[in-house]
Image (tube, grey):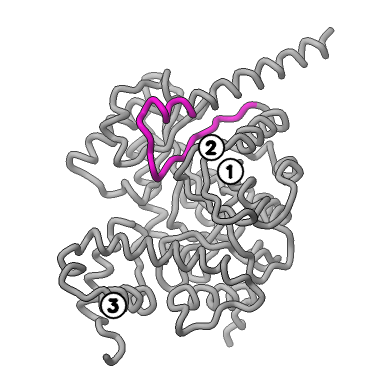
Amino acid sequence: MNDPTPVFQVSQHTLVAHLRNPNKNRAPEGIEDRRLNIYRELIYNNIENFIASGFPVLKDVMSEANWHAMVRDFIECHESHSPYFLEISQEFLKYLAFSYPSRPA
Amino acid sequence: MSRPVSAEGEYTSLAGAGLGLRRSLLDSLADLSTADVNFMEVAPENWIGVGGRFGKKFRSYTERFPFTLHGLSLSIGSPSPLDLEFVKAVKRFMTEHNIALYSEHLTYCSDNGHLYDLLPIPFTEEAVKYTAARIRQVQDILGCRIAMENASYYCAPEQDMSEIDFINAVVSEADCNLLLDVNNIYVNSINHRYDPVAFLRALPGERTTYIHIAGHFDEAEDLRVDTHGSDVIPPVWQLLQEAYDCFGVLPTLLERDFNIPAVPELLEEVNQIKSIQASAQKAASGEEVLVRE
């Protein structure tokens, strides 16, 4: 039988799920929202920035709403295994090839 | 294969004042020598596997300057298993560029996948044991101690113990070194309302390999964000001075990642590190004379 997940890891999964998609996953309890917001923004802006600079044409041809919905879906659903920042674009290509769109329109 | 030894034979030990090297600085810093910047630092994640023109330029730096690595993606506190292939890649990179020191953040940046940003590990006993065991595993693979940095954080979910107790417990249990970030102490002391000097003094000075200093962003009166995007502010310089008074003069590196100013302005801050080091050295040797007399 497997050991139950340690309490601190349950808390980590809650936080990360929320940061991946704040609209879908509840924030950890008892934490000021403006503090969580720093993490929400850092993560989203950083990843969006890497994808936008890797795929400028794609960003250009998509509506802003669709673009952001796609980036959000990537952050929520794709498991990026590369530790290298320059490979975020490759992770995004994998997402496009295998997971997009991961939810019905 | 044995490690290549540099002509100067001193590349493995850091001293003086350093500067973080970024891709955008490769051309503008090309004419500097170790008289200007005593050592440099890069994130291995940005350079492993980089060849061609950039790889060559980077090589010209590691041949001329002592280097340290400051990683971002190890995710030491992650609920997912360590990426051992990545740790081995770091080891090869260290050998390839004759870099003896690898530092990382006492944070995590992934669950089942990377988020590419640093999150606070819950400060609990269980997390101490878990994280320390993973640090030991990395040290076993690399064959050397690594230095863990006191990281900046904006909230502390699932907190059972204080930040200082958490850091000290991890460092002692992992038998690792500390990378002391004075800007992070300052930022956290505001964000989490504690006395930065008392915090600094409670850190293990004898395990501190080097110091980081940087600028930050004022999100609110009581909330600061560790951006590395502006000049170092006076209270943080003061904390550096305090660190030297407390632990002796340690190698210190300026981190500047955004809004990077022209080289002369950047070097002004590097020189400020040097002058604080010189006056701390002088004060310390003065005390010694007094003691001897």
- Would residue B260 be counted in the magenta stretch? yes
Residue B27 lies in what quarter of the image?
top left
Q: Quadrant of the C terminus of chain B?
A: top right
Check chain identity for marks 3 and 2: say if they share one. Answer: no
Marked residue chain, label 2: B
Placement of A101 over or under B175, stated as above or below? below
Residue denoted by label 3 = A65
What element does badge 3 sit on?
Answer: helix
Q: Name the side, left or right, on which B283 lies relative to B115.
A: right
Residue A105 lies in what quarter of the image?
bottom left
Q: Nearer the viewer, residue B183 or B106?
A: B183
What element does badge 1 sit on?
Answer: helix
Residue B15 seen in this snapshot: yes
Placement of A54 over or under B240, stated as above or below? below
* Marking on residue B232: 2
**Residue type pointed to by label 1:** Asn
**Residue type pointed to by label 2:** Val
Q: Nearer the viewer, residue B138 or B223?
A: B223
What element does badge 2 sit on?
Answer: loop
Q: Name the side, left or right, on which B56 lies relative to A103.
A: left
What are the residue bounds of the magenta stretch? Answer: B249-269
> Where does the image place residue B62, in percent across and percent down from the top left?
34, 32
Marked residue chain, label 1: B
* Marking on residue B183: 1
Residue sitting at x 52%, y 49%: B217
Q: CA distance from mark 1 to mark 3?
A: 38 Å
State how many labels appear. Answer: 3
> Where does the image place residue B277, in percent across and percent down from the top left?
60, 23
Q: Name the side, left or right, on which B145 lies relative to A82.
A: right
Asked if disc 1 and disc 2 are in contact, CB closer than 8 Å, the reply is yes
- Would residue B285 be counted in the magenta stretch? no
**Residue type pointed to by label 3:** Ala
